[in-house]
Image (tube, grey):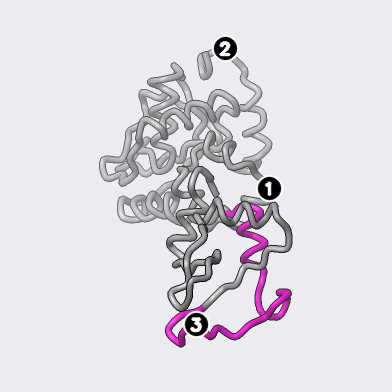
Amino acid sequence: MPGKKGNKKPEALKLQNKYAGMKVEYLDVDSLIPADYNPRRITDEDRMHIKASLQKFGFAEPVIVNLNPERLNVIVGGHQRVVVAKEDLGYTKVPCVFVNLPLDEEKELNVRLNKNTGRWDTDMLQQSFNFDWLKDIGFQESELLNFWKDDFQKKFNSINNSNCDYPIVPKFSENYDAVVIISTNDTDTSFLKTALGITKQQSYKCSRMGEGMVITVEQLRKALNNGNRY
């Protein structure tokens, strides 16, 4: 079992190399004290992903522990990993690095470790990783859907009056912007009819029948999202 005495784990050697110049020690998990103010919570889903990560990679980052005499062995960073390692995976020891901070600075570092994590380059995420894979490692689907675009959306968003085939000035009303979709073949026309529910309607000006409709962006979004995931 990871962390038991007598077991020389490969991740221990990796940690020694990665944190050269820093003191990394394996401490008994029972000697570590969770910070009673720690604002992070762990859900069942979080727990599952942390467990999977520990099983595959071990402790790629050590736990941060305070050596201040008044805060001795209090966990500053790594609470959730310690809980999962101990309760779910049977770890008896975990790798730790150390700080020596009074309570107010310990609290600040705790929050900074959780908050100051940078921002995602969403274009790079979509370019480099698979949607379902990102879900498997812990991203929420709703989180991904906020920025994920399929090929249609990427192409559609790239079109403007400077590069489209038929640049127009909207004339329907000054109150609205307009987009005209040009279909050049029967396949695309059939897709549009099905996706947007276009049917033959009689003109209110005469008895002629024709196909056409004006819809809102929300109606278009619902039509395109029907059965699809972005």
Residue 156 magenta-highlighted: yes
Which residues fall within the magenta stretch?
Answer: 149-177
* Mark 3 / mark 1, whichever is N-terminal: 1
Q: Give, as a three-letter code, the residue at label 3.
A: Phe
Q: Which residue is mark 3?
A: 172
> Disc 3, disc 1: CB below 8 Å?
no
Q: Callout 2: few (<14), some (14-19), or many (20+) C-alpha neighbours within 10 Å?
A: few
Residue 44 magenta-highlighted: no
Dot 1: element: helix
* Mark 2 / mark 3, whichever is N-terminal: 2
Q: Which residue is mark 2?
A: 6
Vertical position of residue 47 compared to residue 221: above or below: above
In 3D space, how far apart are the residues under numbered discs 2 and 3 (Cα atoms)? 78 Å
User: Is residue 68 left or right of 194 when viewed as pictured?
Assistant: left
> Disc 1, disc 2: CB below 8 Å?
no
Q: Residue at x 36, y 50 (%)?
A: 106
Q: Residue at x 62, y 34 (%)?
A: 15
Q: Give, as a three-letter code, the residue at label 2.
A: Gly
Q: Position of residue 191 (x, y in %)?
A: 61, 52
Q: Which residue is mark 1?
A: 128
Q: Position of residue 152 (x, y in %)?
A: 64, 56
Q: Nearer the viewer, mark 1 or mark 2?
A: 1
